[in-house]
Amino acid sequence: MAPSAAVPTDRLLGALRWLSRRLNPRFVKRWLPTSLFGRSLLIILLPIVLMQAAVAYAFFDAEWRTVTTQLSEALASDVAWNVDIYDANPTPETLARLSARAERTQSMTLAFQPGRALPPERSTILPPLDQALRTALDDRISEPVWVDTTRYSGAGIVDMRVAVKGGVLRFLTTRDRAFAARGHIFILWLALATLTLAGVTILFIRNQVRAIERLATAADAFGRGADVHFKPHGAREVRQAGYAFLAMKDRIQRHIEQRTLLLASVSHDLRTPLTRLKLEAALAEPSPRVDSIKSDLSEMEHMIDEYLAFARGQGGEAVETVRLDALIREVSEGATRSGAAVEVDAEPGVTADVRPNALKRALSNLIMNAAVHGAHVLVGARTRPSGGVDILVDDDGPGIPPDRYEEAFRPFSRLDDSRNQNEKGVGLGLAIARDVARGHGGDVTLDRSPLGGLRAVVRLPG
């Protein structure tokens, strides 16, 4: 007995373990909606659906089944009474009298089929209804009984037959006498009320979520540097978030304008004495010291240009749809004229919505940075399967350790401990490139290049 008793226990424990795994929060979260619209809809509609299901179950269990049982018992009592009277005196006169009485007072049609037997049992699509009526008939009639509620279901007829001496007594009556046939009306109204409530709920939630979506779209457009025309609307909390976003946008724009104006003013003030110094150096007698002064002045001018490029970012330029292969070739040709060995391998016809001058400045910085550290530079462009475009700049130089990739993007970072000022550049090339890419809604990342050096990837959105 012990092994056989252990089998159900093991099955029960296995079922409990399976259920506990399925009720794991991570498993449940996987099937829940991720959008605010879906979650709000679930929060509102799930209790409504559960409540309606509970009401429907209570109606069927407490009302519909009870009423059906009572009607079936009353119908079975009438059938049993007619069968008992006929069994007591099975004559044509008794049959005629019972038939007339059943038609007049019991809403039934009674007929005798001599020499007939009960038909075979029929399958039914309404077993609870048949079961209630069959149980009531079996409790009151000792003779074999056959019940069919499906043959004449279109006409709403219930067919009952009882085997008696010499044949079969057949009773035909309406379905209303056997069970509560109008229960589906209640379910129909319940379903219509649920659908109406769901429709109103979807409409209102959709309007509230649309306000949040517009706020998110405006924030994304502002992050890309586009002009934002946004008017807060929706619920009070959503409007407050919208006004906070507009105030933040104004503060950021004022900060950018002040930064650009400050550096432009500094540049203007520095360029005047710088121009005078260059003029004096050009008029001076040639000598190694004068050549050194000219080199320092050229480096100073380059530093001022980089400061201004970093400050300007991409402000003020309109977004255009451009062919990236043509733009990359144009930038690469400029780098080639500067002495860099650049090869272009871009997919033809690839387009993107960008600010051309800003993207040219970013790519120029990346290509020239690669040319400084490597002998060969490869520039390519490819579309991503998920949407968007990647621009790849590879070199065969020494590269950068992976743990210093993020440090390379810091402004004024040179990644050389001595920060040798004799090297051209002030450490703003990668910072400018990432600033431009993020202004387009993308980013710049670094990786190991197949050529052995560094790979810079400009990721642009689709």
Image (cartoon, rainbow, N blue to C red):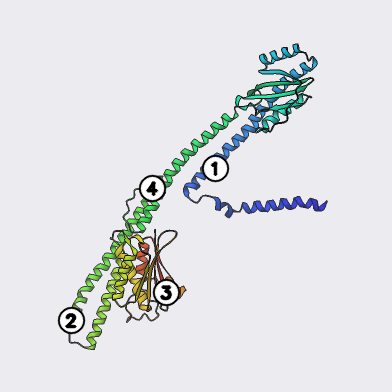
Mark pair 3, 1: CA separation: 54 Å
Ranked by sequence position, the earlier of labels 1 and 4 is 1
Ranked by sequence position, the earlier of labels 2 and 3 is 2
Ranked by sequence position, the earlier of labels 3 and 1 is 1
Ranked by sequence position, the earlier of labels 3 and 4 is 4
Compared with 297, 189 (above or below) is above
Mark pair 2, 3: CA separation: 42 Å
Figure disc tally? 4
- Give residue 63's position: percent from left, percent from top: 64, 29
Residue that label 3 marks: 454
Q: Residues within 10 Å of mark 1 (few under 14, many from 20)?
A: few
Ranked by sequence position, the earlier of labels 2 and 1 is 1
Q: Which disc number belongs to residue 239?
A: 4
State which quarter of the image contains the C terminus.
bottom left
Q: Which disc number belongs to residue 46?
A: 1
Q: Residue furthest bottom?
A: 287
What element does badge 3 sit on?
strand
Discs 3, 4 touching: Cβ within 8 Å: no
